[in-house]
Image (cartoon, coloured by chain):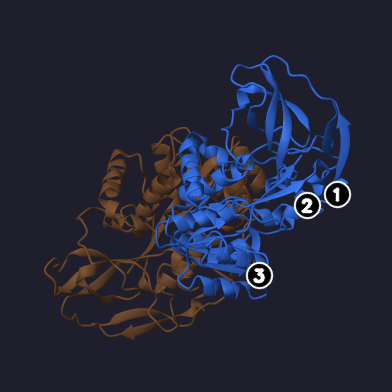
Chain colours: A brown, B blue
């Protein structure tokens, strides 16, 4: 058996990520040792965070040049040396961009048998849980409040906005381009959308939130963060989920204006989070998400790219905002 | 009777505040109407926020050129048209920089009779309550944690550090100059002090918090905020109390780096507050503060300047960091 691998051949540093940073290799299929499991990859999740891991240590250690590119996957158990997993079981794995990998069984949980299985990587995976906990725990939205989301057409943002609608909020999405905006309002039920690429962005944002923002779910940082900070209402909350605008290139020389001055005068709460922080409440979250999907209140959008060799281009495209909803590669 | 007044003759805009921005005037003593009280000023509180009010609307509307300079005071009731106040009672008032002023009685509360009465403006006034609620509510310090405070020798900071010690924390104060640092560690019991004016500031800060910062009480914003942000521990908390570094001059063109990136990866919580937000719990706070003062665990430092005419110079000096503890002017 061959084991295709894509390695991060060299770190991009302050450059934009490009195909030349990756290399395709043929590796061996590893053998699982005691307590280990051999996994075969079905789908690989693509996330903006993949690029952040190349910048330095985050909530995981930094990636290094020459290693198999890291990334989450939906994988199938092929051989198991643990009792709680058997061949054919599906798990969420962290074995990176390769056909086969070995992982310690104690870190793996059998996933439920549901269709389509890709939902395990989108709405019932990290994207859905991130949206759920970030909005509800960090944002604390109340019915009637105004919720604004950046990267609103992405895997997390598209779910955040729909949950906010379910909770009775007025929802404004920020996304790149008018077409995405039409999709957010037309398909997903957002109340308004604003194009951050427009030269009129700030004015349009102000017009979309005439009374200000109660909850801002930030996926981007940078200028969009700053614009929303200035539009916050007193006692508003900002859920800090990511800084997509700052991953693919040199680190910004400065941060947003208004920090910490506006945080004080508006009495804001900003809270950064990583989905694992709430893992003890995953069951409740998944039950809620499944209920909303079943009732049709939550539409799941997946952007599935075919072909292992397309992983680099799919990630690069995601960093440019090409995707709608959850992007993954079918291996 | 004469009524000396100091008016804010013109707004400083982006300039440093200077004596020429003020003018001394002789006004009339006003007469209290129905439901009103005539007050005579004893002590006027000087606060960095006084300068912030000149920049624009904050938690109160912006000051305007030509108006009597605003500021809190400890004042004595001279004539009362309300039942709950009688001549001789002391109140905390908002009548600004003048000998006499009229205020609606419903906004005034009789203050307790305690000695020295100046404590009503310091530890039992806005400074003490700000320190108490900001640290305990926004900072949520636990025994054994490391608490860092900027403007640590000021009215609020000097109390924050001592409360943190009472709560069993390791306390590091940031202040300007070695002499203030010696005072913080020698007199107030701080574990360490760091001089933000030193060219070695960042290195010294890192050395003072080798394991990172759990709670940062920010009075300054700016470069000190940025340095502390980079030194925060995972799940750390930042209480945003003020932005002293940014009040006296042009607004900074940029904010601190690391926002929001480090907020996400370190899972920080930043919370801005104004002391009035916690007014419903003032009684409990005052009881705690009085107990700590009585037991000698909390030392109160007051910097009392004599003479009404010295108000402008006393405020300008405070903005340059001349004071230790709570600065006020005895009228």
Disc 2 to disc 1, C-alpha distance: 8 Å
Give the residue drawn at x 37%, y 84%. Answer: A25
Q: Is any atom of residue A220 visible in this view?
A: no
In x, y percent, where is residue B81?
67, 16
Badge number at residue B178: 3
Q: What is the chain identity of the residue bearing mark 2?
A: B
Q: Secondary structure at mark 2?
A: helix
Same subunit, tags 1 and 3: yes
Q: In which image quadrant can residue A5 be found?
A: bottom left
Sooner in the amino-acid sequence: mark 1 or mark 3 = 1
The answer to whether the residues at label 1 and label 3 have Cβ atoms under 8 Å apart is no
Sooner in the amino-acid sequence: mark 2 or mark 1 = 1
In x, y percent, where is residue B240?
56, 52
According to the picture, the residue beneath numbered tag 1 turns out to be: B19
The answer to whether the residues at label 2 and label 1 have Cβ atoms under 8 Å apart is yes
The answer to whether the residues at label 2 and label 3 have Cβ atoms under 8 Å apart is no
Same subunit, tags 2 and 1: yes
Viewer-side residue, A61 vs A306: A61
Question: Relative to A323, is B39 on the left or the right?
Answer: right
Give the residue drawn at x 49%, y 54%. Answer: B297
Question: Relative to B153, is A119 on the left or the right?
Answer: left
According to the picture, the residue beneath numbered tag 2 turns out to be: B316
Q: Secondary structure at mark 1?
A: helix
Crowding around mark 3 (Cα neighbors within 10 Å: few <14, some 14 to 19, many 20+) is: some
């Amino acid at each position: 058996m061959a084991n295709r691998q894509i390695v991060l051949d060299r770190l991009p540093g302050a450059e934009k990520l490009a195909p030349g940073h990756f290399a395709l290799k043929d590796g061996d299929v590893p053998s699982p040792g005691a307590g280990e499991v051999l996994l075969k990859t079905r789908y690989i999740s693509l996330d903006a965070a993949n690029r952040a891991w190349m910048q330095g240590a985050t909530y995981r250690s930094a990636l290094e040049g020459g290693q198999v590119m890291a990334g989450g996957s939906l994988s199938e158990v092929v051989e198991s040396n643990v009792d709680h997993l058997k061949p054919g079981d599906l798990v969420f794995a962290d074995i990176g961009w390769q056909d086969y990998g070995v992982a310690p069984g104690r870190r793996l949980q059998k996933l439920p048998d549901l269709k389509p299985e890709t939902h395990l990587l989108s709405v019932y995976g990290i994207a859905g849980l991130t949206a759920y906990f970030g909005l509800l725990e960090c944002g604390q939205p109340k019915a009637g409040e105004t919720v604004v989301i950046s990267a609103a057409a992405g895997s997390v943002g598209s779910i955040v906005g729909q949950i906010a609608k379910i909770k009775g909020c007025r929802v404004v999405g920020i996304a790149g381009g008018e077409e995405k905006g039409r999709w957010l309002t037309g398909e997903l039920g957002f109340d308004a959308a604003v194009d951050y690429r427009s030269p009129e962005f700030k004015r349009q944002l102000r017009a979309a939130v005439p009374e200000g923002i109660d909850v801002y779910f930030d996926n981007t940082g940078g200028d969009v963060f700053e614009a929303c900070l200035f539009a916050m209402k007193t006692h508003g909350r900002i859920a800090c989920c990511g800084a997509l605008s700052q991953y693919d290139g040199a680190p910004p020389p400065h941060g947003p204006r208004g920090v910490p001055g506006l945080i004080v005068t508006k009495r804001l709460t900003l809270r950064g989070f990583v989905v694992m922080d709430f893992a003890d409440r995953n069951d409740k979250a998944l039950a809620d998400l499944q209920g909303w999907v079943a009732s049709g209140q939550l539409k799941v959008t997946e952007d599935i790219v075919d072909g292992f060799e397309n992983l680099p281009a799919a990630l690069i495209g995601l960093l440019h905002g090409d995707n709608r909803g959850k992007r993954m590669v079918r291996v």
